[in-house]
């Protein structure tokens, strides 16, 4: 029975990973202009970016999913459960990723920019070859930590019908009347995936440190 339950629940791994990865990527892309605005010299841009980030972060993920999945149809915009989950988690990820990017940029000493300017580098070249590599290395551990958090939050998508790990665990618990075993297996799958993310992050961090000569 254990194997049968495991095979039933493991079917949701693909959907869980898909929602997590796609939401993290889209959120990371949206976070780029947010980070620029957050560090802008213009007060209006800073205020708008800060307001967006604080507004998104203060609302619980479940509320976002319900607002998007059940609320948007009232405006003739109906999304599938998977689409609603990706939109919701992408919005949430954009706010958190913007703050992670900002922390990475803050960690770079102003002397780095001054040295690049002294060498005749323009703003784009400085950002690409001097600031971004160092900021990314600093931001990588928080990004990995948030990716694990997003992976766990993705379980909420089962509430709107997404066929992820938690959804199949619920179905298995009903079918086999083994709630403890079903959710123990689901929890184990989340732990395994989280450990893999952490391992990849640590390995990437080591490679980046070697590349820039930091031990």
Image (spheres, grey):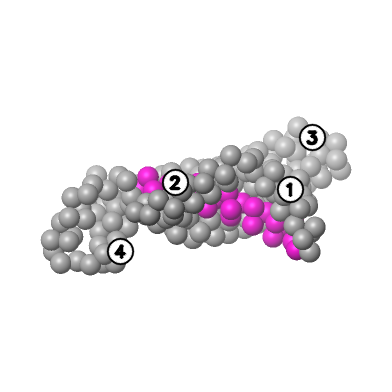
Q: Looking at the image, is mark 2 or mark 4 earlier in the sequence?
A: 2
Residue stretch in magenta:
77-104
- Separation of residues labelled 3 and 4 (CA atoms): 51 Å
The prevailing secondary structure element of the residues shown in magenta is helix
Report x, y in % for residue 98. 46, 50
Q: Which residue is mark 4?
A: 128
**Does the image show residue 190?**
no
- Separation of residues labelled 2 and 1 (CA atoms): 25 Å
Report x, y in % for residue 179. 79, 34
Q: Looking at the image, is mark 2 or mark 1 earlier in the sequence?
A: 1
- Separation of residues labelled 3 and 1 (CA atoms): 26 Å
Report which quarter residue 130 is drawn in: bottom left
- Separation of residues labelled 3 and 2 (CA atoms): 38 Å
151 left or right of 144 in image: right
For the point 72% across and 49% down, which residue is it?
67
Q: Looking at the image, is mark 3 or mark 4 earlier in the sequence?
A: 4
Q: Which residue is mark 1?
A: 66
Q: Which residue is mark 2?
A: 99
Q: Which residue is mark 3?
A: 179
Q: Secondary structure at mark 4?
A: helix
215 left or right of 171 in image: left
Which sits in the foreground, 136 or 68?
68
- Does the magenta portion include 98? yes
Mark 3 or 1, closer to the camera: 1
For the point 26% across and 64% down, which residue is it?
123
Q: Secondary structure at mark 3?
A: helix
Q: Looking at the image, is mark 4 or mark 1 earlier in the sequence?
A: 1
Q: Looking at the image, is mark 3 or mark 1 earlier in the sequence?
A: 1
Report x, y in % for residue 137. 34, 50
């Amino acid at each position: 029975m254990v194997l049968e339950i495991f095979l039933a629940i493991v079917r949701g791994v693909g959907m869980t990973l898909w929602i997590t990865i796609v939401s993290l990527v889209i959120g990371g892309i949206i976070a780029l202009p947010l980070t620029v605005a957050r560090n802008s010299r213009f007060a209006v841009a800073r205020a708008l970016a800060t307001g967006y980030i604080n507004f998104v972060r203060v609302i619980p993920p479940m509320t976002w999913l319900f607002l998007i999945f059940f609320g948007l149809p009232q405006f003739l915009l109906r999304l599938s459960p998977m689409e609603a989950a990706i939109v919701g988690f992408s919005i949430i990820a954009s706010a958190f990723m913007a703050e992670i990017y900002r922390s990475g940029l803050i960690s770079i000493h102003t002397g780095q920019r001054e040295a690049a300017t002294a060498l005749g580098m323009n703003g784009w070249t400085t950002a690409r070859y001097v600031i971004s590599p160092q900021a990314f290395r600093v931001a990588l551990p928080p990004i990995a930590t948030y990716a694990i958090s997003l992976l766990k939050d993705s379980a909420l998508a089962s509430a709107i019908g997404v066929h992820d790990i938690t959804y199949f665990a619920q179905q298995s618990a009903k079918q086999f009347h083994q709630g403890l075993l079903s959710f123990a297996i689901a929890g184990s799958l989340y732990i395994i995936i989280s450990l893999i993310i952490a391992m990849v992050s640590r390995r990437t961090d080591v490679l980046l440190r070697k590349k820039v000569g930091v031990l």
